[in-house]
Image (tube, rainbow, N blue to C red):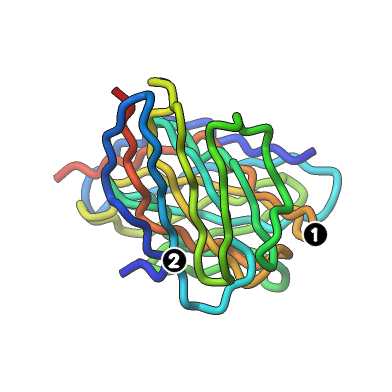
Amino acid sequence: AQSVTQLDSQVPVFEEAPVELRCNYSSSVSVYLFWYVQYPNQGLQLLLKYLSGSTLVKGINGFEAEFNKSQTSFHLRKPSVHISDTAEYFCAVSRGGATNKLIFGTGTLLAVQP
Amino acid sequence: DTEVTQTPKHLVMGMTNKKSLKCEQHMGHRAMYWYKQKAKKPPELMFVYSYEKLSINESVPSRFSPECPNSSLLNLHLHALQPEDSALYLCASSVDRTLEPQHFGDGTRLSIL
């Protein structure tokens, strides 16, 4: 079975500083990886996805993530954050196929301070 | 703007009421999902429909009854809910049930009195 670990429940950072949100997964089979963002009182918005191919994935709003199979990680990064990036970020894994289900991590609150 | 539309945005109901949540998408997606999300927690999968047929029920209590009348519409019928059912209910859709990412609506915030 797959699982996802987001060790940081909250990451405070100053505006215009770089940030990395950590995500580790465990699975005995190949997986597909996603990062979603949830702004207050909204649903989840897909930031980026890794299905196959290049391990460096670029997403919306200047975010990128790198898939590292040997370390089973899929960390999310942004070189310079804005106040508007304050939100909850969820890493998710899926095995794909007919029994595809998204398994979410517990989320990381990115708190950008002026 | 989200391409998955959920109505109503907010719903307050008593434990004896019957109400329904509605979800609509016009992206031609053939898989649709219901999730429940409590505060400060990740979404929990409830039901999955694939080509209008129920394919996954995550052992959800029978007071929640899903329905997929057509490929664009997903309903969640509610009856005799409990206070612990108060949560944000999210609908999502994807091209199909394989590896395509899921697109979420903004949810219905449900409060049970």
Quadrant housing the C terminus of chain A? top left
Q: What residue occupies the far left of the structure in this picture? A: A114
Task: For residue A91, say whether it is visible.
Answer: yes
Q: How many marks?
A: 2
Chain of the residue where label 1 is placed in the rendered structure:
A
Instruction: Measuring from the top left, give residue A18's x and y in whole percent.
Output: 35, 52
- Amino acid at dot 2: Glu
Circle nearer the viewer, 1 or 2: 2
The reply, left or right, for residue A34 in relation to residue B37 is right
Residue A81 circle label:
none
Q: What residue occupies the far right of the structure in this picture? A: A28
Instruction: Measuring from the top left, give residue B14's x and y in whole percent.
Output: 31, 26
Task: For residue B39, say whether it is visible.
Answer: no
- In the foreground, B12 or A103: B12
Quadrant housing the N terminus of chain A? top right
Q: Is residue B108 above or below residue B22?
A: above
Q: Are tags 1 and 2 found on a single chain? A: no
Q: Which residue is mark 2?
A: B24
Residue in the image at 49% along x and 54% along y:
B75
Residue in the image at 59% along x and 41% along y:
B46
- Amino acid at dot 1: Ala
- In the foreground, B59 or A60: B59
SS label for mark 1 = loop
Residue in the image at 20% along x and 52% along y:
A83
Q: Which residue is mark 1?
A: A98
Instruction: Measuring from the top left, give residue B28's x and y in whole percent.
Output: 56, 79
The reply, left or right, for residue A96 in relation to residue B13 is right
SS label for mark 2 = strand
Instruction: Measuring from the top left, give residue A49's x and y in whole percent.
Output: 58, 64
